[in-house]
Image (spheres, rainbow, N blue to C red):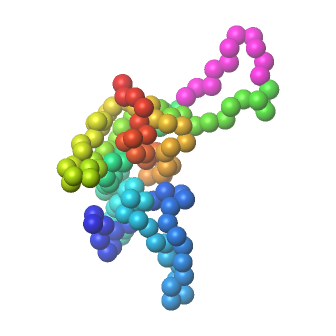
């Protein structure tokens, strides 16, 4: 287990099960639900954020919405989406295969990646927005 008492964790928006125990709210998580860990007392920073397993921390590149020449498109028709392209900032160690062998990651810090739409979990670190995603959700690197 990579998590110990005193660690802070970042987990998916729809992960875990909430419960109340001795009057306090708690969340039960599977180890695979945890995306990033950090020392709780220090708070989450880029220096102490540790990406776990086969997760990748990506700085999302803002995509400019282009309009084709002369065509008017109503605001209600325009597709509202976030970018699914970004720069790899941190990479987890990888995932263990069923035979116990660690499968190494196929991306490195600095790679640009295209990933599946809506597959990333949004994370704010030091007032900047990042995305955490599984290696299997990366479609291409360039």
Q: Nearer the viewer, residue 60 or 120?
A: 120
Task: Identify the residue at the far left of this view.
Answer: 101
Q: Name the chief secondary structure element in magenta.
A: loop
Residue at image point 75% right, 11% down: 70
Residue at image point 38% right, 59% down: 32
Q: Nearer the viewer, residue 26 or 75?
A: 26
Task: Identify the residue at the far top of this view.
Answer: 69
Q: On screen, 98 above or below 17? A: above
- Which x, y percent locates residue 91? 31, 45
Q: On screen, 31 above or below 106? A: below
Residue at image point 49% right, 36% down: 116
Q: Is residue 34 visible?
A: yes
Check if residue 78 falls in the magenta segment.
no
- Which x, y percent locates residue 71? 76, 14
- Which x, y percent locates residue 134? 40, 45
Q: On screen, 103 above or below 72? A: below
């Amino acid at each position: 287990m990579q998590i110990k008492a005193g660690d802070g964790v970042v987990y998916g928006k729809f992960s875990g099960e909430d419960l109340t125990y001795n009057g306090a709210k708690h969340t039960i998580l599977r180890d695979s639900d945890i995306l990033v860990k950090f020392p709780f007392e220090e708070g989450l920073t880029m220096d102490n954020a540790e990406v776990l397993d086969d997760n990748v921390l990506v700085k999302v590149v803002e995509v400019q919405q282009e309009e084709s020449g002369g065509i008017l498109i109503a605001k209600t028709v325009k597709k509202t989406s976030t970018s699914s392209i970004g720069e790899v900032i941190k990479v987890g160690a990888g995932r263990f295969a069923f035979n116990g062998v660690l499968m190494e990651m196929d991306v490195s810090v600095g790679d640009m990646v295209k990933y599946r739409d809506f597959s990333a979990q949004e994370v704010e670190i030091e007032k900047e927005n990042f995305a955490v995603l599984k290696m299997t959700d990366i479609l291409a690197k360039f």
